[in-house]
């Protein structure tokens, strides 16, 4: 069984920074793409940033230049450095990883439980 555990959320003021982490555990073979998603109250979940297997990032326009996604494949961990946070960044942040396991013999998308980020103005 694969589990993803996020950490690093919290309450900050506009302009401040937070760093989110997502660590995978369990019977993991390889990890393909990874990503961070967020869901604001009353809105659908949206992609914030993704990173492929070789480390190429992709960002939503709303966070480009402020957020940085990175991965440490050896540690099975992904990070999201969030700088110059804005109130509209408020939401629950979920991590996602495409993981290959011997049990499934294919890549399957796993999700974390989410961590709350609240930015006050």
Image (tube, helix red, strand yellow):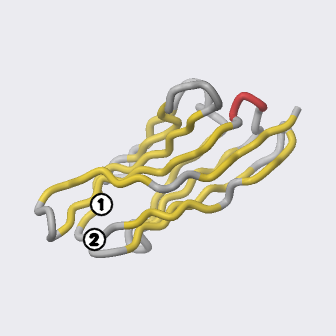
Q: Residue furthest front?
A: 42
112 or 88: which is nearer to us? Answer: 112
**Residue 79: image x %, image y %?**
55, 57
Decide if residue 27 is on the left or right side of residue 62: left
Q: Residue at x 58, y 45 (%)?
A: 93
Q: Residue 28's mark?
A: 2
Q: Neighbour class for label 1 at 10 Å: few (<14), some, many (≥20)?
A: some
Q: Quadrant of the C terminus?
A: top right
**Residue 116: image x %, image y %?**
67, 48
**Residue 86: image x %, image y %?**
77, 32
Decide if residue 20 is on the left or right side of residue 11: left
Query: How many numbered discs sit on the rendered protein?
Result: 2
Residue 66 vertical placement versus 8 (above, below): above
The quadrant where residue 15 appears: top right
Residue 71 vertical placement versus 24 (above, below): above
Decide if residue 110 is on the left or right side of residue 65: left
Q: Secondary structure at mark 2?
A: loop
The quadrant where residue 28 appears: bottom left
**Residue 113: image x %, image y %?**
51, 55
Q: Neighbour class for label 2 at 10 Å: few (<14), some, many (≥20)?
A: some
Q: Are marks 2 and 1 in contact (CB under 8 Å)?
A: yes
> Which residue is the site of mark 1?
31
7 or 16: which is nearer to us? Answer: 7
Q: Residue at x 67, y 59 (%)?
A: 8
Residue 67 vertical placement versus 1 (above, below): above
Q: Secondary structure at mark 1?
A: strand
9 or 67: which is nearer to us? Answer: 9
Nearer the camera: disc 2 or disc 1: 2
Q: Quadrant of the N terminus?
A: bottom left
Q: Residue at x 33, y 67 (%)?
A: 2
Q: Residue at x 47, y 56 (%)?
A: 112
């Amino acid at each position: 069984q694969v589990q993803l555990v996020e950490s690093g959320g919290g309450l900050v003021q506009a302009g401040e920074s937070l760093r989110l982490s997502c660590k995978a555990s369990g019977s993991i073979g390889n990890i393909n793409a990874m990503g961070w998603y967020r869901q604001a109250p009353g809105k659908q979940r949206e992609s914030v940033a993704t990173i492929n297997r070789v480390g190429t990032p992709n960002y939503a326009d709303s966070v480009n230049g402020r957020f940085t996604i990175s991965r440490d494949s050896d540690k099975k961990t992904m990070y999201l450095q969030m700088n110059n946070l804005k109130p509209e960044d408020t939401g629950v942040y979920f991590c996602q990883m495409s993981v290959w396991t011997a049990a499934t013999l294919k890549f399957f998308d796993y999700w974390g439980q989410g961590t709350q980020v609240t930015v006050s103005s």
